[in-house]
Amino acid sequence: MKRQDIIALRLQNQQLLLPSFTAAADVVRWLGAVQSQDYAGAKWALANRLKTPVEADIEAAINAGHILRTHVLRPTWHFVLPEDIRWMIELTEPRISALSAKYFRDLALDKTVLNKSNKTIVKALQSGRHLTRKELGEALENARIATNDLRLTYIIFRAELDQLICNGARRGKQFTYALLDERAISATRFQRDEALAELSQRYFRSRGPATVKDFVWWSGLSSTDASKGLEMVKSQLECVTFGDQSYFFSQPAEGKKKHSVHLLPAYDEYTVAYKDRSLVIDRAFEEHAGHGIFNPNIIVNGQVIGSWRREISGNKVMMEVQYFSRVAANTGKKVSSAAKRYANFIAKELTIKNI
């Protein structure tokens, strides 16, 4: 298999080429988890994988709890579905807790303190209340639990890992927390091996072709667990060799290949889901591209060719576009069309500036 064949399969499996979904929750279900610490960017990541995206619809799905947001996997903020949140946390929490144990010790957050803080947070959020981080901090301080330095961050983090809380509905532009019991009433539960197989199947189905090292990076699992998970589902996957690496994937439905241009946000799953991004980012452009993680990038036929940024003022959005090398005139026109799609998504008037 050639490099471009792998890229074309990734584009299709990631739903960036010939998207089949109309609802954001279906995209999250397909991908399993979608990195979302850049909240606005994460909504656009979902939109890029929908037939006809509307920002208000995605926001409504999140506020209604059809899509949840919590710390899981590596861990960082991710969108997940209510049906998946518990088994994903149960699978990845032991390794997360082991890796973060030093921070809890340094902040004097032992079991006694965390048991008290968990009870305080649950009490504060009872009866359907959705509270901001600041309000949770005030409730903890009133219970004589110090929240200075990074203590509040790790207290809330622990409550997430203990499956007590997740995101609530946004209050204006403020994020809130709510009880997980009230947001994930019908969550699926798996035995550990079942969960390992499910996460492996979701990853290689939606991100393949990918390597086991890619899966280790994305999932936060140990190499041993990732290899075990892959072995469980390998019979359902195809395998190709490129260079000295084995790539695993599910064969997508046949579709007509087409020239594709995407303006992807920072932390998009198309780049962040892989340990090795050299297939899609020229090494000469790695820093300019934020290593495929930290910058919003322009993707043409699966290759990173530039970056973009936007500034919003009132009902207008000004987009700056920077190419890493000279591009053809028709490519510039297609990038402009992709920019207009973004402006339509956020319902703003567009101005484009090449820098």
Image (cartoon, helix red, strand yellow):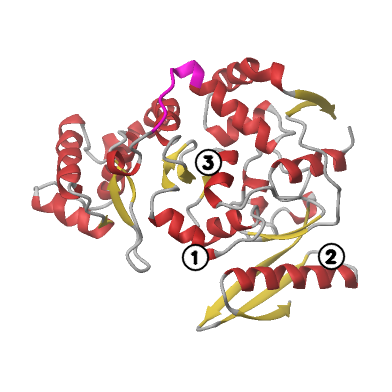
User: Mark 2 touching mark 3, by CB under 8 A?
Assistant: no
* Circle 1 SS class: helix
Q: Earlier in the sequence, mark 3 or mark 1?
A: 3
Image quarter where the N terminus lies is top right
Q: Which residue is mark 2?
A: 325
Q: Between tags 2 and 3, which lies in front?
A: 3
Q: Is residue 337 above or below residue 266?
A: below
For the residue pair 270 and 245, the one nearer the viewer reads as 270
Mark linked to residue 56? 1
Identified by mark 1, the residue type is Ala
- Which residue is painted at 61% across and 58% down in the image? 47
Closer to the chain start, of discs 2 and 3, is 3
Where residue 37 sits in the image (x, y, percent)? 47, 53
**Residue range of the region highlighted in magenta in the rendering:** 187-194
Q: Few, some or many C-alpha atoms within 10 Å of disc 2 (few <14, some 14-19, many ≥20)? A: few
Q: Where is 333 relative to 276, above or below?
A: below
The residues tagged by marks 3 and 1 sit, at their Cα atoms, a distance apart of 21 Å
In the picture, which quadrant includes the C terminus?
Answer: bottom right
The numbered mark, 1 or 2, whose residue comes first in the sequence reads 1
Residue beneath the point at 21% across and 32% down: 110
Residue 253: horizontal and vertical position, in percent?
78, 37
- The answer to whether the residues at label 1 and label 2 have Cβ atoms under 8 Å apart is no
Say whether residue 294 is visible: no
Secondary structure of residue under mark 3: loop
> Which residue: 60% across, 61% down?
53
Residue type (three-letter) at the residue carrying disc 2 = Ser
Q: Is residue 193 magenta?
A: yes
Dot 2: what SS?
A: loop
The amino acid at mark 3 is Ala
Out of 224 and 36, give the one closest to the viewer: 36
Crowd class of label 1 (few under 14; some 14 to 19; many from 20; radius 10 Å): few
